[in-house]
Amino acid sequence: MTEHHHSAATPSFTRREILGVSGTAALAGIAARASSAAAEKRPRIACIVTYWAAPGSHADWIITKLLDGYWWKGAHTPSRVDVVSVYIHQLQQSGLGQKVCKSKNIPVFDTVREALTLGGKELAVDGVVLVGEHGVYHDNLKGQKYYPRWWLYKQVTQVFEQSKRSVPVFNDKHLSTSWDEAKWMFDKSRELGFPLFGGSSIPFYYRKPEIELEIDTPIKASVVAGGASDEGSLFHCVDVLQAFVERRKGGETGVAAVQSIRGPETWNWTARNPWAGKLLDAVGKTFGLKTGHFQETVREPNVCIVEYRDGTKAAIYSARGVGWTYAGEIAGRADPAVVSMLGWPGPYSQYHAANAFEHWLVEMMLTRKEPYNAERLLLSTGIVSFNMESNWENGRYLATGRRVETPYMNMAYRTARGPLFNTGPRPPVIPYIRGFEK
């Protein structure tokens, strides 16, 4: 099958290179060599996806930006990678993906292995993008959807092992419904020595105000309010939480316990834990809502309670109308720190929601460095998994879930990352033009 390559961006030259060359012909020669070298350095990416159909599918959001560029820091940025192969698990249901690949001359392979080896025997790409989101997959009683992320990821790592070489891997959303599978996936990345990145795009989205907490901020307690009615939407909220709390004084220490409470008992627990009520009210105040707004308006209340090993506390509330908003109680400050993602007036298009996510995906493929510690992705995955387990015991559902102790979620690390979120003018809200009908 043929492979498709995009043209490289115009290279830049150092002052020394320019001053050391006499004549336009010599300068042109350097330009040609630099352009050729730049083209050779463009990572070749294999995309492994579950489903690529409606324009709202994550595969469409992510892969088309790898093909056509993305909006970063107020301007359109051309892609710096080449998508050279695709595997689609639910291929027959993915008419849009088939059309895009055909229009871009990208081969669609029958297996994960062929996509990574380009039909050969050895690993033949420089990076893997795994989008195991959307498609027709069944749910279990706990409300977890069985996307085959671990199954696909395992096939990827088998090619790495047999080729005795590994490349960066991006995994959209949480690693798995299962802690055991997620931990295996993380451990395999450390064993084979490849960068692992993924999770939610929301921590990378535009913020109001445009601030990042300083590293070693003395956070005592945190609340996140946002859509958290099911496993998938809860993960977005958990990943927002982790993006902030990992910056606390002393760094991340891991999670000691997780608990899920659903229904009216949500507000009884809040009354017994005034730190949570105070932070939730701070979220409402930021949006001009009256005290007690959420207690009066949320039809199906629920709270995910997170206890960290260093004593830090956190709670995630399901709420509408406030985007994804973080509120943190910080020692020595009279008022909570409140930062919102989405939900503010201004142009917004779902297609552009993951632009900053794409930027750091591409950066990892170019630099082989994780944009943030992969332990964060593992912790976020674990919190969601054990939250979903909390309401179930011996086949019985309990609205007031049991407190699940998690001594194995003891990942400790200190982040050294600066701000990763998008800034500047937002992209124009215009239809995405493909050159063919949907």
Image (cartoon, rainbow, N blue to C red):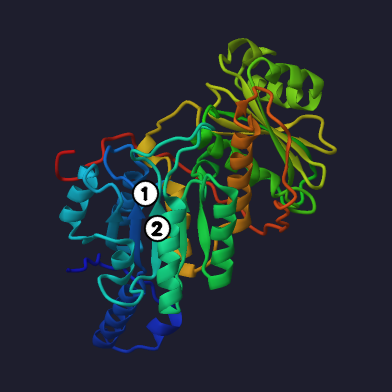
Quadrant of the drawing holding the C terminus: top left
Which of 371 and 74 lies nearest the eye of the viewer? 371
Q: Residue at x 21, y 45 (%)?
A: 92
Q: List the residue tagged with mark 1.
A: 62
Q: Secondary structure at mark 1?
A: helix
Q: Earlier in the sequence, mark 1 or mark 2?
A: 1
- Residue sticking out furthest to the front: 394
Nearest the viewer among 339 and 389 is 389
Q: Quadrant of residue 6?
A: bottom left
Relative to 212, residue 169 above or below: below
Amino acid carrying mark 2 in the image: Val
How many other residues sit within 10 Å of disc 1, few (<14), some (14-19) or many (≥20)? many
- Is residue 207 something one can see in this rendering? no
84 shown above or below 62:
below
- Measured from the top left, where is residue 50 in percent x and y? 34, 48
Q: Is residue 106 above or below residue 384?
A: below
Using the rendered view, name the quadrant where residue 102 is placed: bottom left
**Residue carrying label 2:** 129
Query: Which quadrant is home to the N terminus?
Result: bottom left
Are dots 1 and 2 in contact, CB under 8 Å? yes
